[in-house]
Image (cartoon, rainbow, N blue to C red):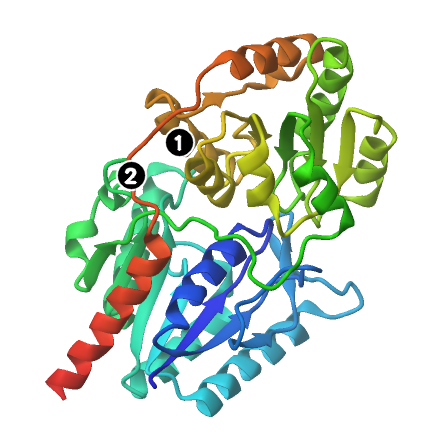
Amino acid sequence: MKKVMFYCQYLAGMGHLVRSTEIVRSLMKDFQVCFVNGGQPIYGFEFPASVEVVHLPPILEVAGQLAAVEPSQCIEAVKENRKDQLLHVFEQFQPDCLIIECFPFSKHKLKFELLPLLDRALTASTQIVCSLRDLIMTQTLSATARAKRYDKVRDLVNQYFDLVLIHSDPQVQRLEEQLPNVDQLNCAIYYTGYVAQSPPERVPLDVNDTAYLSSDRPMIVASAGGGRFGYELLNAVANASQRLADQIPHQFHIFTGPFMLDDQVAALEAAACENLVIRRFTPHLIQYLERAELSISLGGYNTTMNILRTGVRSLIFPAASEEQTGEQTIRAEKLAQKGILDVLTTADLQPERLAEKILTALQRPPAFHSFDLQGAEKSAARIKQLLDDVTVAA
């Protein structure tokens, strides 16, 4: 059985981990997979059965700079340790294919460990693949800086990569809308469709999940992805829930995300009552969205895919952070134009106004779409084709 090594790093939320894990789940059917996780571990998160998971010393991004998750650790020592560990894993596993998530289209701060890994893979004649979400490089840059970034991306792709997998439906988003020199890329470009999350296979429902998901009471779900951003939205939902307590029978379920600050979670928990439930994280979020009559969330990739998969009515506030606002806004506005969801603005977070938005959204019929959500399966199939072609050529 051929081997695939998959490198994933999430620096703020957990979206990259969720998407990458879903692709790995499909890869496991045909390959032996080693999944290298560089982000902060998440309690209760399920990795696919039988996958080999290697956890690098975790890092995150603080004020635009890399930092060790453990404050006592020196980031330079952590970086050196990670680089050495990555190369060791490569030598031990000896993959036929190396998948790098996002780089070189983003995450250039990780060059310290990725370029040595890519150099080693190149000398080993390993097939190198980029796993790329639908939107890239949405940060505010000058025209000169953006042109330099485009050229840098092109040069790195052409130097190292055999294939770029774009996890998008081209009827919604195409690479050339963001990368004007895409025709100068020498490797194959393949649109996989969107990668939509599956329900967990090995994490059973706990007592709370069982009770809430089996209840006949109508439900509204609010979530903030990983939780480093989104307190403003969830606090607004908590306030709006109090104003709606006597108007609608729905119970609000707020999931803060595993990385929300403790004092922010405590402030939300102080508002908990009979119609408002506050929890940090559930691996069963997609089951909640299947039950819900409305989702209120930020506009990250995986949350949006959950909305498309379940068909739940949705209000999205695409303003997680300065770095992510561009990505989330573009995606949300495109889907809003197609009637899939409604976009919230900062002004909409006033309690009375948000309560009105919720009441209006509940009256709308669920949206239907024909977008391709088979991105995980198609990614695995395209990797298999890539390696089969290499075998035939040899």
Identify the residue at image location x=26%, y=70%: 159
Q: CA distance from mark 2 to mark 1?
A: 10 Å
Q: Which one is in front, 319 or 18? A: 18
- Residue 242: where, in percent of width, then height? 78, 16
Furthest residue toward left: 393
Quarter of the C terminus within the rendering: bottom left
**Image position of 96 (left or right of 107):** left
Q: Which one is in front, 215 or 82? A: 215
Identify the residue at image location x=75%, y=70%: 73
Query: Which quadrant of the figure has residue 184?
Result: bottom left
Q: Is residue 255 visible?
A: no
**Mark 2 neighbour density, 10 Å: few (under 14) some (14–19) many (20 or more):** some
Check if mark 2's residue and mark 1's residue have beta carbons within 8 Å: yes
As displayed, is residue 357 above or below residue 334? above
Which residue, given by chain and number where applicable, does mark 2 sit on? Answer: 173
Q: Secondary structure at mark 2?
A: loop
Who comes first in sequence, dot 2 or dot 1?
2
Identify the residue at image location x=66%, y=27%: 233
**Image position of 248 (left or right of 198):** right
- Residue 273: where, in percent of width, then height? 84, 26
